Amino acid sequence: MASPAKRIIVTGGSGQVGQHVIATLLSHGHDVLNLDIAPLPPSLSSKVHTLRTDLTDSGQVHSALTSRFHPACPFDPATEPLNQIPDAVIHLAGYPRGMIVPDGEMYRVNTLASYNVIEAACRLGVKKILVASTVCVYGPPYAEGDMDLPCFPVDEEVDTNPMDVYAISKVCVEKTARGFARRFASFGVDIYVFRIAAVIPPGEYERFFTSWRADPRDHKAVGWSYTDAQDFGKMCHLAVLKDGLGFQIFNATNDDITVETRGSTATAFLKQASPSVPFTREMGETEAPLTNRKVKELLGFQQDHSWRMYVA
Ligand SMILES: NC(=O)c1ccc[n+]([C@@H]2O[C@H](COP(=O)([O-])OP(=O)(O)OC[C@H]3O[C@@H](n4cnc5c(N)ncnc54)[C@H](O)[C@@H]3O)[C@@H](O)[C@H]2O)c1
């Protein structure tokens, strides 16, 4: 049965992750408005309007969240009423790592844009808010030097205590989301945070895995885990449809560890690769160390894009 179509605002939809999220949402029949300072590529701009919005400006965000989705001349209030509140906001915009701009500017944009979007969405009565975070909050990806994960598998209960500014900015975003979810709980607001791993867009598997396979220890920093861009779009679609979970954090990862365990197991590989890290439970034979068990159990996620389908 087809799922109900929703009106969804995506922020940062022009970026690497956002383009695939938008394409997936469109494939499920949703209506989308993109808020970004950059345009969408032509393949999407004919279907989705981009309202150029600087999300670090609170006034722009409040106005944009009540915007119409489609330009028209003249507007037809019967087709698209003025001041409609979207069914969901998916907040992806921001800097996806350090070293793009100076650290302080990255921290300012990531925290302020997220604050503005979460605050405006809650105050305007949006009932579903999805927020992009990162598995960098677990520490290793941009640490100073080699760092072990705290345990295997890493689930969403593990303490987050990163040292790099990008991950620290995302810890702040997660805390902001949690506080607003608590504050607006009686209004029926759900806020789900996705901790995304290294994102692999379609056609990029060979490139990623060729570099990773040279030495499996090379992808220790990313926790031997990844996020397929299209599968992440599917997670967003499922999250938009799933109401009533309040505040949740999900590891938005795919099922499989990124090394070949043929004849062995993920556990055996990890015991050898990170011998001092404790195990908190028995892991599946090929389970990703940054486990996605929760997103499967609570949102019913099933991956479509195992890396094994694309890497010879
Ligand atoms: N790509 C990854 O591997 C990865 C991994 C983990 C988490 N994430 C998270 O996913 C989200 C999207 O990442 P991405 O890889 O698509 O990044 P990206 O840089 O490709 O896209 C980010 C988008 O945000 C927009 N943006 C930046 N500042 C803005 C502002 N002030 N106002 C409006 N728009 C603004 C940019 O124009 C861009 O289109 C980010 O929150 C990132 O932290 C990405």
Image: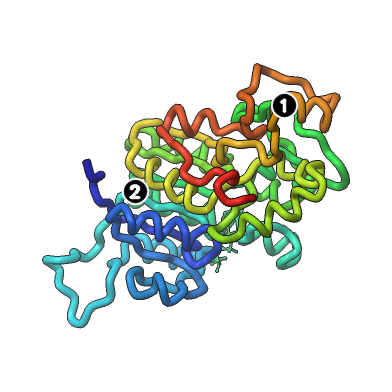
Q: How is the image coloured?
A: rainbow
**At which x and y percent is residue 180?**
47, 41
Q: Nearer the viewer, residue 158 or 178?
A: 158
Mark 1, residues whose alpha carbon is within 10 Å: few (<14), some, or many (≥20)? few
How many numbered markers are drawn? 2
**At which x and y percent is residue 41?**
46, 74
Residue located farthest toward the bottom when viewing the structure as drawn: 73
Q: Nearer the viewer, residue 303 or 63?
A: 303
Q: Nearer the viewer, mark 1 or mark 2?
A: 1
User: Looking at numbered disc 1 in the image, what kind of residue is underneath it?
Assistant: Ser
**At which x and y percent is residue 286?**
63, 30
Q: Give the residue at mark 1.
A: 264
Q: Is residue 1 visible?
A: yes
Residue found at x 35% / y 36%: 242
Residue found at x 56% / y 58%: 201
Q: Is residue 196 visible?
A: no
Q: Which mark is residue 248?
A: none
User: Looking at numbered disc 2 in the image, what kind of residue is underneath it?
Assistant: Val
